[in-house]
Image (cartoon, grey):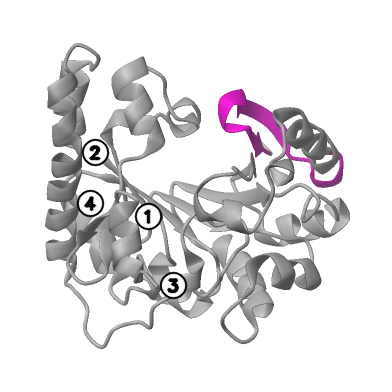
Amino acid sequence: MEDVWSTLKRQKYKIVGAHSAVKICHWTKKSLIENRVCYKQKFYGIESHRCLQMTPSVAWCTHKCLFCWRPVEYNEDTPYSYDVPEAIVEGCINAQRELLSGYHGFLEKVDISKLKEAENPTNVAISLAGEPTLYPDLSGLIEEFRKRKFSTFLVTNGTTPDVLSSMDSYPDNLYITLPAPTKEIYEHICNPQIKDGWSKLNESLELIQKIKTKRRILRLTLVKDFNMKGVEEYSKLIEKTNPDYIEAKAYMFVGYSRKRLEVENMPMFDDVLEFCKELEVKTGYKSIDFAKDSRVILLSRN
């Protein structure tokens, strides 16, 4: 059977050092070729072509989610030694440039000024694959990006509240994924690889509201026939978290998730819209923006 590193390389991940990786985002490509932008640009002003999508923990995770696009079947053990933040940041920027170099051969299709800017990214999304909080110097990594004038996104599954509570540096945008309204649904859809995953997630939800950062965002990844129910239970968890924003986003039928789910499990935009209407009634949050092509709706109390 093909090992995880060979699989990731075949999927156009650029491996950086011993455990990090970069992959050009779908929306970076769309921005360069079609002048279309990611919902993060629409919602938060993050330029799609200048976003570096990376992870410091490409092959380690505490979940094996049904909806994950990566090959979760290949989870690796965490290593005994780790690359330092400076090497990771430098390696990721160089990897982004290398991955973009092929676009110089299609200058009749590409916005050349955007391509030059893309080679000097200004935002990092620390997500991509794996659970980034398993990297032991996450604060140092965020600080290293900040030294280079990057804005920072961090997406976590919330299973490491001890890490979140002890960080010295927090990202500008802190995402936590809420994948289910109840423990039973959570265990079915996320297949946690650690003991007490649900209680650890709940601990992180309570912790998030105490963290001071620019935006605290609760991400609901919605999978039809799995977790688009229990709005009352969702509302209680949202109340406990008190996020600045909620992103309700449809699961997308891509990557390795196609081996675990069916295309019918991918909600249409109207399904997400109906779910959000129920959520509005229960939580007091209101829909303030949306992106139909990404099947995502942004909610806020303000």
Separation of marks 3 and 1 at Cα, in angstroms: 28 Å
Circle 2 or circle 3, nearest the eye: 3
290 lies above or below 99: above
Mark 1 lies on residue: 171
Separation of marks 2 and 3 at Cα, in angstroms: 31 Å
Of the image marks 3 and 1, the number of the one nearer the N terminus: 3
Amino acid bearing label 3: Tyr
Q: Which residues are magenta?
A: 281-300
How many other residues sit within 10 Å of disc 3, few (<14), some (14-19) or many (≥20)? Answer: some
Separation of marks 3 and 4 at Cα, in angstroms: 32 Å
- Helix, strand or loop at mark 1: loop
Amino acid bearing label 1: Pro
Mark 3 lies on residue: 74
How many other residues sit within 10 Å of disc 2, few (<14), some (14-19) or many (≥20)? Answer: many
Q: Quadrant of residue 66?
A: bottom right
Of the image marks 2 and 4, the number of the one nearer the N terminus: 2
The residue that appears at 52% across and 55% down in the rendered structure is: 256
Question: What is the number of the mark on residue 146?
Answer: 4
Amino acid bearing label 4: Arg
Residue 55 visible somewhere in the drawing: no
Of the image marks 1 and 2, the number of the one nearer the N terminus: 2
Mark 2 lies on residue: 122
Residue 164 position, x and y percent, is: 46, 71
Would residue 261 be counted in the magenta stretch? no
Amino acid bearing label 2: Thr
Separation of marks 1 and 4 at Cα, in angstroms: 9 Å
Circle 2 or circle 4, nearest the eye: 2
Circle 2/circle 4 CB separation < 8 Å: no
Of the image marks 3 and 4, the number of the one nearer the N terminus: 3
Separation of marks 1 and 2 at Cα, in angstroms: 14 Å
Would residue 294 be counted in the magenta stretch? yes
